[in-house]
Image (cartoon, rainbow, N blue to C red):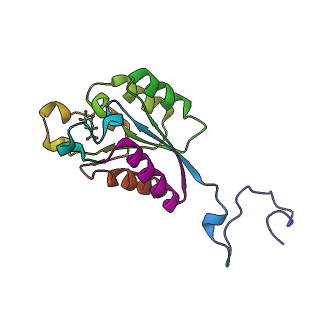
Amino acid sequence: MNSFTDGGTPTAHPRPTAGRRRHTLLPMKNILVLNGPNLNMLGIREPNIYGKQDYPTLVAFIQEAAAKLGLAVDVRQSNHEGVLVDWIQEALGKFDGIVINPAAYTHTSVAILDALKAVALPAVEVHLSDVSAREPFRHVSYAGMACRKTFAGHGFDGYRLALEYLTTL
Ligand code: DQA
């Protein structure tokens, strides 16, 4: 007898019982990973700050980290604020969370902040560099005001930490 045959209301996700593992019963979380302007130039741009590894290497790193955590990821990059806003809006109903490195738009974009607030999906902010130790204009993060957590200064690993954090929610 189980929750489908005992006369009770069938549930999409029966409670785990002995011998059943919780992760085999729940659907995989789907995470949207967004990268802002100039991150496509990784490896070329200011390697002393952002490292020598290129953008495709970052995407592969994120995909591997997600697979290890049992997450599905869609990793996107745009140099255009409105495109990032559109992607955040479209995430509603399709994704369970957002990891975002808004790059320079971090420090300027109320539109990205408003989009994150509008969809109200759990969001985590990532920066490759430690923005708090750089120029004062990088100390302000609009997007961060709508994020549950920020990982800055961990390089590529910040994305893994952000994904790991989303698995805990
Ligand atoms: C960045 C930090 C931003 O200040 C900068 O404009 C970027 C990258 C980072 O990942 O460290 O483009 O978001």
Magenta: main secondary structure equals: helix
Report whether 2 appears left or right of 151: right
- Report the residue at 83% width, 62% height from top: 4
Residue 163 in view of the camera: yes
Front one among 120 and 127:
127
Coordinates of residue 58 in the picture (x, y in percent): 38, 47
Coordinates of residue 59 in the picture (x, y in percent): 43, 46
Q: In this view, does 164 lie above or below 146?
A: below
Front one among 17 and 112:
112
Looking at the rendering, the stretch of residues picked out in magenta corresponds to: 53-73
- Report the residue at 87% width, 63% height from top: 7
Position of the N terminus, as image quadrant, is bottom right
- Report the residue at 56% width, 34% height from top: 92
Q: Does the magenta stretch include residue 29?
A: no
- Report the residue at 48% width, 36% height from top: 120
Coordinates of residue 31 in the picture (x, y in percent): 51, 46
Coordinates of residue 119 in the picture (x, y in percent): 50, 33
Report whether 30 appears left or right of 76: right
Q: Is residue 9 above or below residue 141?
A: below
Determine which quarter of the picture holds residue 15. Answer: bottom right
Determine which quarter of the picture holds residue 38. Answer: top left
